[in-house]
C-alpha cells in the first residue's frame, strides 16, 4: 500500500495499482475467439494465486497527526490571600472536597460547577437578641408605630429586611455540600439557617473555625475531578492570581485539522487512533474548536499550495474506554477518519486487476484462463470494488505473477 501525502492537509491513504497488460486478441481475452491449442497452452503457462470475489465494506481513510495527553491546561483562579503552605504534585488527581492547595495552612477546597466564586456565602448580618432588649439597652426611642428613632440600628434593620441570601451560586454550593454527605438542609437557591449548620459541620471536619460562612478564598470550582498540570508558585510564595493549572483526568487526543477540511469533524464521529506502540484504539470526535489559528496563506519560505490557507482548527478526540490506551500518558499518535465508504460491495485485491487491450479493466477467471470485463469503483485497504454482469460473490479469479 502506497501513501500519497499532499503538501497541506491530511494524509490520504490510497492504494498503488499494479496492472498487467493482457495479450491482445479476442481469444486471449476470453471475450470470444476460437480458443485453439495455442491459446490453451498459453493459459496453462499462466500462474498466480487464486482468490475469490468477496462482499465487504470498503473505506477510504485520511490520516492526521495528533498528540495524546490530557487536553488543554486551564488556570485555577484562586481568591485566597496569604502564603502558600502546601501544593499538590504535578499529575496528582484532585476530587470534590479535596484541597487543591493550602494558603496560610487553610485548605482551598475543590467543588464541581460552572459558576465561578464571586461573593461570600452566608446568613445576612443580624443581631440574635430580642429587638426589645436591644432597644432597652441602647436607650433607643420608639415612635407610636413601634419603629426606632434616628438612633436605631439601621444597618441591622436593612439586613433583616434583605432576607436570606439567594442565587444560583447558593444552589451550586449546596449541591456540592449534599454530594459530600452533609444533610439537614434543602438544596435550593436559598442559604438558610440549616445550610449554615451544615457548613459549620463541614468546617469542623476540615479543621477550620465554624463560622457558617464560606469566604471567596475557601473554594474553587471546576467541571469535575482535575489533574494538576502545572504550578507558577512555590511553597512560601504569595497565593495570588492563578498559582495552579489543571486538566481533565481523562486522556484524549488533540489534532490540528485544516480549517478548510473539517467537514468530517462532527461531534460523535468515530475515528481510529494508532498509538506510539502500534496498537489501534477506537475514539470519537468530542469537540471541534470554533477559532482557527494561523491562516496567513503561506508556508515557511513560500506560498502555500494552490494559494490555500494554513489555518488550523483544534479537534479533540475522546475515548469511552480509557483502559484501551494502556499505560501511555502522552505521545504522538496517528488519527484516521473515513472519507468515503461503500458498504456491502463486491471486491477483489487490487493486484487481481488486469488492463484489457481494448481499454478498461478485467479479471482472469481461475478456470480456463478467460478474462471478464469489470467496472471499478472505490479503491481502499488494498482492495477494489468491482461490478459487471459476469461478476458474482465467490467467483475464483487469478492474481497474475
Image: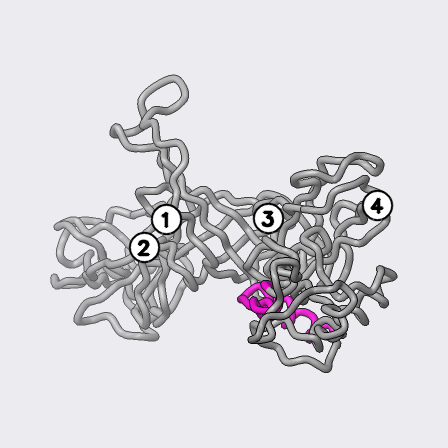
Callout 1: SS: loop
- Image spot of residue 74 (x, y percent): 60, 46
Say which mark, if any, is on residue 379. 2
Spatial CA span between label 1 and label 2: 7 Å
Q: Is residue 41 left or right of residue 284?
A: left
Q: Residue at x 62, y 47 (%)?
A: 276
Q: Magenta stretch?
A: 158-180
- Image spot of residue 77 (x, y percent): 63, 46
Viewer-nearest residue: 369 or 298: 298
Spatial CA span between label 1 and label 3: 28 Å
Say whether disc 1 or disc 2 marks the residue closer to the N-terminus.
1
Spatial CA span between label 4 and label 3: 37 Å
Disc 2 crowd, CA 10 A, few/some/many (<14, 14-19, 20+): many
Q: Which residue is under mark 3? A: 68
- Image spot of residue 63 (x, y percent): 44, 47
Regarding residue 94, the answer to whether it shows in the image is yes
Does the residue at mark 1 contact the one at mark 2 (Cβ under 8 Å)? Answer: yes
Q: Residue at x 24, y 70 (%)?
A: 391
Callout 2: SS: strand
Q: Is residue 93 left or right of residue 397?
A: right
Does the residue at mark 4 contact the one at mark 1 (Cβ under 8 Å)? Answer: no
Q: Which residue is under mark 4? A: 104
Callout 4: SS: loop
Q: Which residue is under mark 1? A: 15
Spatial CA span between label 4 and label 2: 66 Å
Q: Residue at x 55, y 58 (%)?
A: 115
Amino acid at each position: 500500500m502506497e501513501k500519497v501525502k499532499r503538501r497541506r492537509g491530511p494524509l490520504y491513504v490510497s492504494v498503488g495499482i499494479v496492472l498487467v497488460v493482457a495479450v491482445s486478441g479476442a481469444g486471449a481475452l476470453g471475450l470470444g475467439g476460437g480458443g485453439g491449442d495455442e491459446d490453451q497452452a498459453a493459459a496453462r503457462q499462466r500462474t498466480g494465486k487464486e482468490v475469490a470475489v468477496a462482499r465487504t465494506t470498503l473505506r477510504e481513510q485520511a490520516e492526521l497527526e495528533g498528540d495524546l495527553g490530557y487536553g488543554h491546561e486551564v488556570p485555577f483562579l484562586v481568591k485566597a490571600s496569604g502564603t502558600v503552605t502546601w501544593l499538590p504534585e504535578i499529575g496528582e488527581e484532585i476530587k470534590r472536597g479535596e484541597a487543591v492547595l493550602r494558603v496560610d495552612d487553610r485548605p482551598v477546597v475543590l467543588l464541581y460547577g460552572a459558576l465561578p466564586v464571586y461573593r461570600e456565602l452566608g446568613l445576612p448580618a443580624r443581631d440574635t437578641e430580642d429587638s426589645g432588649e436591644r432597644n432597652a439597652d441602647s436607650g433607643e426611642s420608639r415612635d407610636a408605630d413601634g419603629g426606632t428613632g434616628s438612633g436605631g440600628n439601621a444597618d441591622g434593620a436593612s439586613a433583616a429586611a434583605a432576607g436570606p441570601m439567594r442565587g444560583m451560586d447558593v444552589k451550586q454550593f449546596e449541591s456540592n455540600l449534599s454530594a459530600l454527605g452533609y444533610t439537614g438542609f434543602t438544596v435550593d437557591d436559598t442559604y438558610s439557617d440549616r445550610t449554615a449548620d451544615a457548613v459549620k459541620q463541614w468546617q469542623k471536619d476540615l479543621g477550620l473555625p465554624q463560622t457558617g460562612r464560606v469566604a471567596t478564598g475557601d473554594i474553587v470550582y471546576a467541571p469535575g475531578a482535575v489533574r494538576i498540570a502545572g504550578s507558577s508558585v512555590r511553597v512560601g510564595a504569595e497565593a495570588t492570581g492563578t498559582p495552579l493549572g489543571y486538566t481533565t483526568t481523562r486522556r484524549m487526543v488533540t489534532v490540528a485539522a485544516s480549517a478548510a477540511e473539517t467537514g468530517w469533524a462532527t461531534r460523535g464521529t468515530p475515528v481510529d487512533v494508532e498509538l506510539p506502540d502500534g496498537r489501534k484504539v477506537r475514539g470519537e470526535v468530542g469537540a471541534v474548536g470554533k477559532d482557527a489559528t494561523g491562516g496567513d496563506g503561506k508556508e515557511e519560505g513560500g506560498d502555500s499550495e494552490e494559494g490555500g490557507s494554513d489555518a488550523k482548527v483544534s479537534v479533540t478526540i475522546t475515548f469511552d474506554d480509557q483502559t484501551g490506551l494502556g499505560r501511555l500518558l502522552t505521545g504522538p499518535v496517528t488519527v484516521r477518519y473515513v472519507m468515503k465508504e461503500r458498504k456491502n460491495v463486491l471486491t477483489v485485491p487490487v493486484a487481481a486487476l488486469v488492463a484489457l487491450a481494448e481499454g478498461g479493466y478485467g479479471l482472469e477467471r481461475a478456470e480456463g484462463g478467460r478474462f471478464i470485463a469489470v467496472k471499478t469503483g472505490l479503491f481502499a485497504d488494498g482492495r477494489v470494488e468491482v461490478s459487471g454482469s459476469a461478476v458474482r460473490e465467490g467467483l475464483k479469479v487469478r492474481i497474475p505473477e
